[in-house]
Image (cartoon, grey):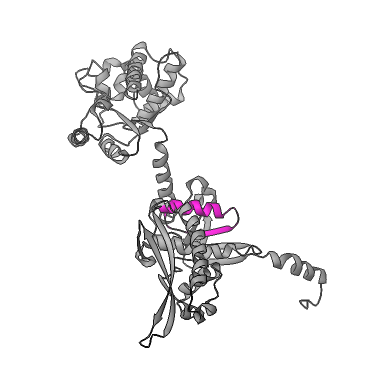
Amino acid sequence: EWNWKSDHISEYVARIFLKPNLPKFLYYDEYFALPSRISIEKLESKTLGDSEQKTARALFDLAEIDTSELIQSNDFEDFIAELEATEAIISEELFKYWQTNKNLGITFQIDSVKDNQNRVVEHVLDIRVKNKGVSLPLKNRSKGFNWFFSFLVWFKKIQEDADSQYVLLLDEPGLNLHASAQADLLRFLEDLSEDYQIIYTTHSPFMIPSNSLERVRTVFEEDKTSVISNSIQEKDPNTLFPLQAALGYDIAQNLFVSKKNLLVEGVSDLIILTALSGLLESLGRQGIRDDITIVPTGGLEKVATFISLLRGSQLEIACLLDSYNDVKARVKMENLISEKIIHQSKVRFFHDFIDTYDKADLEDLFEKKDYLNLFNSAFNEYDNIEVSDLNSNIDRIILQINKVIEKNRFNHFRPANEIAKISTDECTFSEVTLQNFENVFKEVNSLFD
């Protein structure tokens, strides 16, 4: 039938099996938004803008309204019934995913424009959005809402074609949506992907599914071409930035998986507290409760910021902190307490558990010889430090070690990480060390009772 000169069997296979199953590629971008008012005459004569023509035609096809018939009619009752049915279909789908504001509603109205002789010269479909009884034209809503609504109209029309396979190509979907609405859109696309192949471009970290990074490809522009590659291999920092931002956002969201969160200063605190809690529990003693999540904030000065960010998240928060060295950090925390953002009873300092010093860090919970064992094991570049080498007139073992090695600061993570490397048992640390940590855990647990 296709007039192939030879290989008729291949022609038959291509015609019967391949061509009917070739997918259709459909492209949609930010500009294909529905206007608030659609001139039926301009739609019929195809004089609307290209982008408006696409989505407006999809709306009328979805409503199964013959625009040429509508133009000839003066009674819009039948058409209104069809539009209201379409209105219900689109609204149900829209507000299944649009979680930002569920008080909205969509209305369609058909108006006629008359000249001075009271003759109808134009028929217009008016699209309005209701919010608690008050309606506004579609264009007066946010660009993000308009895009989401227009995309649904366009896509609902596509779904009616059950006989074709589609590959959807979306250019920067949801560009004007804020972060939580982009998450709604991502959820919508995830559901669509069960039936459609979807390829979309984005610069937004909120449009990158951080739990499915194997789907992501980076596009890097070189002098003469563009290179699409696996994201792990990409070395250009600008290209990788949305991926890094997506991962950072995901980590920030998933830090607070628990209703009860203990804020500490750094990762070394997290490692030490977790390791000692596990050791004490293995010895039948009290560790930190399983329902409490230890959250490192990245420094004492950032604790107040974390508390402010988490306010109103219905999470229980307590703090376990080093003694203040920084005046600004202390003032921030005092302001949070005075403004009742966090109660003073939920804040504990390590010097509360140490009789030796007026000020203390987490490391001071260890008996000196225990912490020096960790330090000496972690820092082979220094000669082993003995307890007798330390100046007991200086508060805090960290400052005492700084004095010996003649540095302002050493990497606190390295001694903490030694705990993760060694096999700990009841002989690893002294009873003084174990008792200090158990006292801390008992107090922390009580803060969440």
Q: How many marks?
A: 0
The quadrant of the rendering that contains the C terminus is top left
Pick the residue in front: 404 or 413.
413
- Residue at the bottom extreme of this rendering: 117
Q: Is residue 192 left or right of residue 118?
A: right
- Residue at x-position 37% and y-position 19%: 373
- Residue at x-position 72% and y-position 65%: 18
Quarter of the rendering containing residue 109: bottom left
Quarter of the rendering containing residue 138: bottom left
Residue 411 in view in this figure: no
User: Is 162 inside the magenta-drawn segment?
Assistant: no
Q: Position of residue 377 (x, y in %)?
A: 40, 23
- The span shown in magenta is 181-204
The quadrant of the rendering that contains the N terminus is bottom right
Q: Position of residue 126 (x, y in %)?
A: 41, 70
Pick the residue in front: 72 or 373.
72
Pick the residue in front: 16 or 370.
16
User: Is 200 inside the magenta-drawn segment?
Assistant: yes
Residue 261 in view in this figure: yes
Above/below status of 137 relative to 132: below
Above/below status of 361 relative to 190: above
Q: Position of residue 311 (x, y in %)?
A: 30, 38
- Residue at x-position 43% and y-position 46%: 247
Q: Position of residue 242 (x, y in %)?
A: 42, 53
Above/below status of 279 relative to 48: above
Q: Is residue 140 left or right of residue 189?
A: left
